[in-house]
Image (cartoon, rainbow, N blue to C red):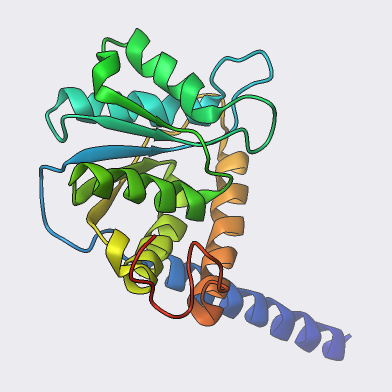
């Protein structure tokens, strides 16, 4: 019985230590690489639309936060980024329609419709920015997703110097549909993923080549 108690104690201790390492890493992830209050663009990261073509809860909140920042004068334009990554619907288009329904002129909304994941979201968005001569962005996404976004931006700026920008992340609101359990699960999964990425780094790809690229 005493042995069982010690085993239980050490198991619980190990769990606590792992949790502290995982979450400690997560809360120390960067949130920006430049101090600024005004940017050339607001990049709103995509997430799947509902199958009926309407915004999903997270998609809705990301877009609405981007619109609030646009109306507050943080940047004069919105880049909605996301292709048909998880179903037949192009995320960027659903997002753009929502932004325009909130009073944002269509001329101030750019749709990036190729990206299949967050790395590609930032690769294609920064490509668009550089094509227009824009060099800074506020990046809007769900609260739990910002750490990984920051790691991607650091990797992109290092491995793709031609696409480097000044940036900061900005959290959308949580969807009212999400309870505390849902939030904890999302944060925990993302915190573990970020620890792995911080230790191992991103694998080489044409979007994040290990050898710094001079052109996209």
123 left or right of 199? left
Q: Is residue 169 left or right of residue 119?
A: left
Can you give x and y, in whole percent of width and height, for residue 97 in the image? Answer: 43, 14
Location of the C terminus by quadrant is bottom left
Say which residue appears at 25% left-offset and 18% top-offset.
107
Say which of 191 and 211 sits in front. 211
Q: Is residue 133 above or below residue 109?
A: below
Quadrant for the N terminus, please.
bottom right
Question: 215 or 159: which is nearer to us?
Answer: 215
Please, is residue 10 above or below residue 27 in the view? Answer: below
Residue 102 higher or lower than 157, as above or below = above
Side (left or right) of 16 relative to 87: left
| Snapshot quadrant of residue 104 | top left
Residue at 35% across, 23% down? 64
Q: Residue at x 24, y 46 (%)?
A: 137
Q: Residue 36 location, x and y as percent? A: 10, 51
Residue 176 in percent (x, y) is at: 49, 24
Q: Position of residue 74 (x, y in %)?
A: 15, 35
């Amino acid at each position: 019985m005493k042995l069982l108690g010690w085993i239980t104690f050490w198991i619980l201790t190990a769990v606590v230590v792992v949790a502290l390492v995982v979450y400690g890493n997560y809360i120390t992830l960067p949130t920006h690489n430049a101090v600024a209050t005004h940017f050339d663009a607001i990049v709103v990261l995509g997430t799947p639309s509902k199958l009926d073509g309407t915004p999903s809860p997270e998609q809705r909140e990301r877009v609405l936060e981007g619109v609030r920042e646009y109306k507050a004068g943080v940047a004069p334009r919105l880049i909605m980024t996301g292709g048909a990554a998880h179903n037949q619907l192009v995320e960027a288009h659903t997002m753009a329609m929502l932004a325009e329904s909130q009073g944002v002129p269509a001329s101030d909304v750019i749709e990036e419709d190729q990206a299949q994941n967050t790395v590609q979201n930032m690769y294609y968005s920064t490509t668009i920015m550089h094509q227009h001569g824009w060099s800074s962005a506020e990046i809007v996404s769900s609260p739990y997703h910002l750490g990984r976004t920051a790691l991607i931006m650091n990797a992109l700026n290092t491995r793709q110097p031609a696409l480097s920008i000044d940036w900061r992340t900005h959290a959308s609101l949580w969807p009212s549909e999400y309870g505390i359990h849902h939030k904890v699960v999302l944060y925990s999964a993302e915190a573990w993923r970020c620890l792995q990425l911080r230790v191992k780094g991103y694998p080489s790809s044409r979007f994040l080549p290990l050898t710094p690229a001079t052109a996209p």
